[in-house]
Amino acid sequence: MKLVYFAWVRERVGKTDEDVEVPEGIGTVADLVRWLKGRGEEYEYAFENEGIVRAAIDHVHVKPGASIAGAREIAFFPPMTGG
């Protein structure tokens, strides 16, 4: 599965994207975030406030409880502002 990081999430993780093999038992976006946080300080820092980081599965915005089954790409980004 491809993970893509945007804005300050990318800066904190230290990469724009990566291909990962998600372990069994990781079924939702929230599960994936918790797993990522265990991969190192940079991920812990990027996802320190899980409630504000947004996710999209295959270019569709989703909530943390969304299933990642069959996903090709999951993108993570901070809340967007603007006008």
Image: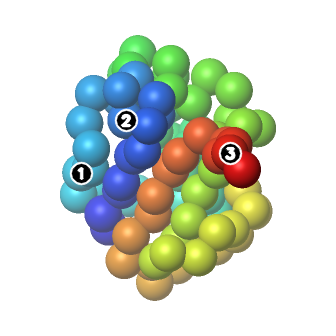
Disc nearer the start of the sequence (2/1): 2
In this rendering, the answer to whether 15 lies above or below 22 is: above
Place of residue 63 in the rendered image (x, y in percent of width and height, measured from the top left): 74, 62
- Which residue occupies the foreground of this view, 13 or 39? 13
Q: Which of marks 2 and 1 is in front?
A: 2
Q: Which residue is drawn at 63% across and 63% down?
A: 28
Specify few, some or many for label 1: CA neighbours under 10 Å numbering under 14, 14-19, or 20 or more. Answer: few
Specify few, some or many for label 3: CA neighbours under 10 Å numbering under 14, 14-19, or 20 or more. Answer: few
Q: Which colour scheme is used?
A: rainbow
Marks 2 and 1 sit apart, C-alpha to C-alpha, by 11 Å
Marks 3 and 2 sit apart, C-alpha to C-alpha, by 20 Å
Residue occupied by mark 2: 10
Give the side of residue 21 with respect to residue 83, left or right: left
Question: What label does residue 27 carry, if any?
Answer: none
Marks 1 and 3 sit apart, C-alpha to C-alpha, by 28 Å
Q: Label 3 near label 1: C-beta < 8 Å?
A: no
- Which residue occupies the foreground of this view, 60 or 38? 60
Q: Which residue is drawn at 36% across and 26% down?
A: 11
Residue occupied by mark 3: 82
Disc nearer the start of the sequence (1/3): 1
Direction bottom: furthest residue:
70
Q: Residue at x 68, y 68 (%)?
A: 62
Residue occupied by mark 1: 18
Direction front: furthest residue:
83
Kind of residue at badge 3? Gly
Q: Label 1 near label 2: C-beta < 8 Å?
A: no
Q: Is mark 1 on a helix, strand or loop?
A: strand
Kind of residue at badge 2? Arg
Q: Which of marks 3 and 2 is in front?
A: 3
Give the side of residue 43 with respect to residue 83, left or right: left
Kind of residue at badge 1? Glu
